[in-house]
Image (cartoon, rainbow, N blue to C red):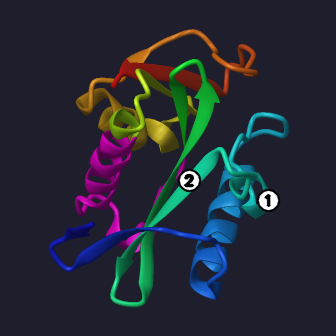
Amino acid sequence: MRNGDLAIVVDDLSGPAVVAFLDDHVRQMRAISPEGSSHALDLDGLRPPDVTVWSVLDGDDVVGCGALKVLGGGEGELKSMRTAPERARSGIASALLRHILADAAARGLTRVSLETGSTEFFLPARRLYERFGFTYCDPFADYVPDPHSVFMTRKV
């Protein structure tokens, strides 16, 4: 899918640009979240067949990524949403989230949930999810209550 000059593509995680982008994501999430409270998936966690990863490309540059993990029972989990820091608040996350939710609907999923951080750093992400109709919920799947985590969900 193209969005202006951006392309949203399914990524096999083999290119060095996406590997570096996701390594930066995991490193940042682990640096700002207490041990045991960072749920960002590393490359191995994003490779199983029940996970689809999309990269947002501006030419050859990876400027965003996101993933959808199918949980079963018609439910999915949004994972690894990230926009390049220098491109924050430029519409990349909104375009990608729209794309992922459309894909979830096309697959017949009825609900998409997510876990994100509870601190001020994650406030822009929580506001984005709220704008897309996500509401706060209890932990889902294998998550447990954690003061550093916020759980959100929406029907597709």
Residue depicted at 40% across the width and 29% down the height: 108
Query: Percent x, y for residue 17?
Result: 58, 84
**For residue 63, what is the image quadrant?**
bottom left
Query: Percent x, y for residue 14?
Result: 67, 79
**For residue 150, what is the image quadrant?**
top right
41 vs 9: above or below: above
- The boundaries of the magenta stretch are 79-103
Q: Please rate how many residues cluster around mark 2, counting C-alpha atoms within 10 Å: few if below 14, some from 14 to 19, many from 20.
A: many
Going by the image, does 42 lie left or right of 103? right
- Estimate the spatial distance between the alpha carbons at disc 2 and disc 1, rounded to whole Å: 12 Å
Labelled pair 2, 1 in contact (Cβ < 8 Å): no
Q: Quadrant of the N terminus?
A: bottom left
Q: Quadrant of the C terminus?
A: top left
Instruction: Specify whether residue 85 is painted magenta.
Output: yes
Q: Considering the numbered disc 1 on the image, is that residue within a helix, a strand or a loop?
A: helix
Query: Percent x, y for residue 93?
Result: 34, 54
Instruction: Specify whether residue 14 is painted magenta.
Output: no
In the rendered structure, find residue 52 and report the number of the disc placed on it.
Answer: 2
Going by the image, does 106 lie left or right of 79? left
**For residue 89, what is the image quadrant?**
bottom left
In the rendered structure, find residue 44 and report the number of the disc placed on it.
Answer: 1
Going by the image, does 134 lie left or right of 79? left
61 vs 103: above or below: below
Residue depicted at 30% across the width and 74% down the height: 7
Going by the image, does 135 lie left or right of 5? right
In the rendered structure, find residue 145 and report the number of the disc placed on it.
Answer: none
Mark 2 and mark 1 lie on one chain; the one further toward the N terminus is 1
